[in-house]
Image (spheres, grey):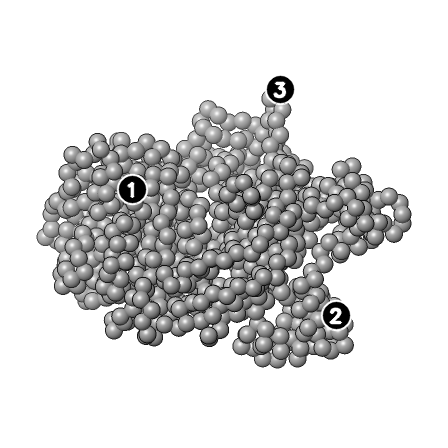
Amino acid sequence: LQLNDKPLGDPDLQFLLLGGELIKIRSRSWKKNRFFKLQEDCKTLWYESHKIFKRKQTFSIDDIDYMRKGRQSEGLNKHTPSSVEGQCFTIIFKGRKKNLDLMAANEDEANKWVNGLEKIMSNMLNLSQQQKSEHWIINCMRKADKNDDNKMTLKELKHFLRQVNIEVDDTYAADIFKQCDKSNSGSLEGSEIKHFYDLLTYREEIDVIYGQCAHTDGQMSAEDLLNFLLNEQREQVSMVDALKLIEKYEVDETAKQKKCMSKDGFLMYMHQEEGSILNPAHKQVYQDMHQPLNHYYISSSHNTYLMADQLKGPSSTEAYIKALMKSCRCVELDCWDGANGEPVIYHGYTLTSKVLFRDVIKVIKDYAFKVCEIMPIAVMESFPFTDWLFPWFLQTSDYPVILSLENHCTVDQQKLMAHYLISILGDALVSKPLGNNMPTNFPSPEDLKQKFLIKGKRLNKLDAALNNNSFIEEDTVSEEDEAADCKENDQKAKTKKSKIKLAKELSNIVIYCKSVHFSGFEHAKEMQAFYEMSSFKESKAFHLAETSATAYINHNMDKLSRIYPSGSRTDSSNYNPVPMWNAGCQIVALNFQTPSKEMHINQGRFLPNGASGYILKPEFQRSLSSQFDPSVLTKGPWLKKKTFNVMVISAQQLPKLNKDKENSIVDPLVRMELYGVPADNASKETHYINNNGFNPMWNETFVFDVHFPELAMLRFVVEDYDTTSQNDLIGQYCLPLTSVQSGYRHIPLLTKRGDLISSAGLFVHLMLIDP
């Protein structure tokens, strides 16, 4: 616990610590030299301009989403020649922060920058929750040590306590200081700092749990641990499993030899995936992936090309990359005639910028099934704890991606669109039905691994695809329903025709997702083939879900339905996706670019099953004999009433919200929200705790009645209480109730944008029982 911990002598890290010149690129004419350097905390990068008035800027390594070698960003591809490919790299940030396009003096230096930063990011991902906690505390100690003498005065100790989000009065701070200052030197150093650290990080609640379960000479024997796992954690385990945990997490060799778990080993175990709220078995693909495609909820994006609002925000290929890297499996492309005969993608009738259709297809091809560039596979495989929080940090899903085309192009540019889809996607594009016979049902996600499906208009029936579509010509078809809705929201476009001419080349590659207008459930049942699907504006979909829920669910048992936000949501806000999932709708499209409660729920819905972007619907939404109605509590196999008990015990190391004000300390409260059928929707919250974001403790218990656990989503929200204005979000976490582990569990916390807050978490006790 020295305050001057330094990184190991890795040559790439040493290179970053020394720093060097890089060229920052914004355009063909704006290319500026900047000196970049990794700070000694190995968590912050700063750079300095060479102007007369020098400005220093910094950003945290935590803010980096991933690195990208070469001229792969839009900016570098556009503003640099191919001859400097090896010298270029891009830093991709989380959220809406702009990419940083950089060019090194040579390829070797570029590799050192990329490799060095990736090693730091990999190391930070590999830290256990306890190690992240220690790392964060030590960094705060460093910042408090103003004169870098590796000692802490009383004044520096007070500064440190504010850094870690604790407000204490001067008397209490002085008492802590006096208790640790064994040498009476007026400052803490060495073992005194260690003593102070131990006092600060003492977990009373863990002490109590351990004391209740450790019945063997003050330690937890393998039998004690097994009893804890069976009775408190409600896990299906044996003595073999208990011994494995001791071998894996016990830090004291003497205790390990005695087949016992010490308090430190118990704390280590509680902070690992086995002690997480998310069932570790669900971090991999665990569901049956051989059922028809329409039997799954599919992670879906609306207006995927947008980075911000729907009126004047930028369109970017980067938006597709971000969505795909979070295992979104249905992306939208609004296609329009562009200059020089090249089709473009943008939000029609608005001031949003345009991106080439060709570039978007290239990016989708490159990133749909890609292993994330954050670290080499060999390095990933050596890190056991990187994927239990976010499997999508490592690899996107192998399961199929649907390209939802909203086509406004003339025939010539449609032909070019078809050419790009066929030539770029190659064999991965599904251009005819699987097998040699006319299908009667959808293939499964397993059948379609690493395949692309096109959703759009088609000129004829699917059986023509088996006859090579030889006899069809261009013809007019009605526009997509969403395109018509778009016009309704634009006064200037009202006179536009509602039909477009469709090129046969584009029609021919629409196989399993032919867009048709919805004319009622009876019409769909009698007249529509299984591959003919409809898109519903949110207002229409919600109305159907409320008035004809059972019919809607039955419709979705053999058809696909896509739901999209209302055109009036010009700020790219989102609707609640849960009622749509309750109605069995598969493609519930949301604005991924907008951080919101709705996106938190969506992120939680697709967190399990390996974050594959596909979740198998409950059996009662797949069986044709089902008469399930989410608004009616009728008896049936779907009604599985449970009582859900939640005890909110404590939180650890909540972040300061106003980092510019040293005296600003959060007043945290925790709210639990259940989303499901109307009878299950509920929200309950703790009291708030004054001035303690470091280790607040509530010990409050709440009870929820749940009728349909298979449809229920659980969301934890931590807020900073404010008496005069709306509470501020500190962190949140959401997951399906069916993926919750019972017992004492730690809960990671995410930012509003869904990124991990590395050191923060909640500690709770959960139990789902029959009433």
Q: Which residue matches tag 1?
A: 567
Indicate the position of residue 608 as horizontal and vertical percent values. Answer: 45, 62
Q: Hey, what amino acid is under mark 3?
A: Ile
Question: Is residue 314 visible to us here?
Answer: yes
Residue placed at 36% from the left, 45% from the top? 304
The quadrant in which residue 580 appears is bottom left
Mark 2 and mark 3: Cα distance apart in space: 59 Å
347 vs 68, nearest the viewer: 347
Whether residues under marks 2 and 1 lie with C-beta atoms below 8 angstroms apart, the answer is: no
Residue 253's mark? Answer: 2
Label 1: few (<14), some (14–19) or many (≥20) C-alpha neighbours in 10 Å: some
Q: Nearer the viewer, mark 2 or mark 1?
A: 1
In the rendered image, is residue 559 in sight? no
Residue name at image x 52 percent, y 41 percent: 725
Label 2 CA crowd tier, 10 Å (few <14, some 14–19, many 20+): few
Discs 1/3, front: 1
Q: Secondary structure at mark 2?
A: helix
Depth check, front residue: 192 or 47: 192
Q: Is residue 52 left or right of residue 32?
A: right
- State which quadrant residue 287 falls in: bottom left
Q: Residue furthest top?
A: 52
| Residue, far left | 471
Which numbered disc covers residue 52? 3
What's the residue type where badge 1 is placed? Gly
Q: Give percent across and percent down for residue 594.
A: 42, 44
- The image position of residue 758, as x and y in percent, is 59, 51
- Whether residue 737 is situated above or below residue 358 in the rendered picture: below
Q: Residue furthest front?
A: 723
Q: Is residue 558 left or right of residue 161?
A: left
In space, the residues marked 2 and 1 are separated at their CA atoms by 63 Å
The residue closer to the viewer here, 582 or 12, is 582
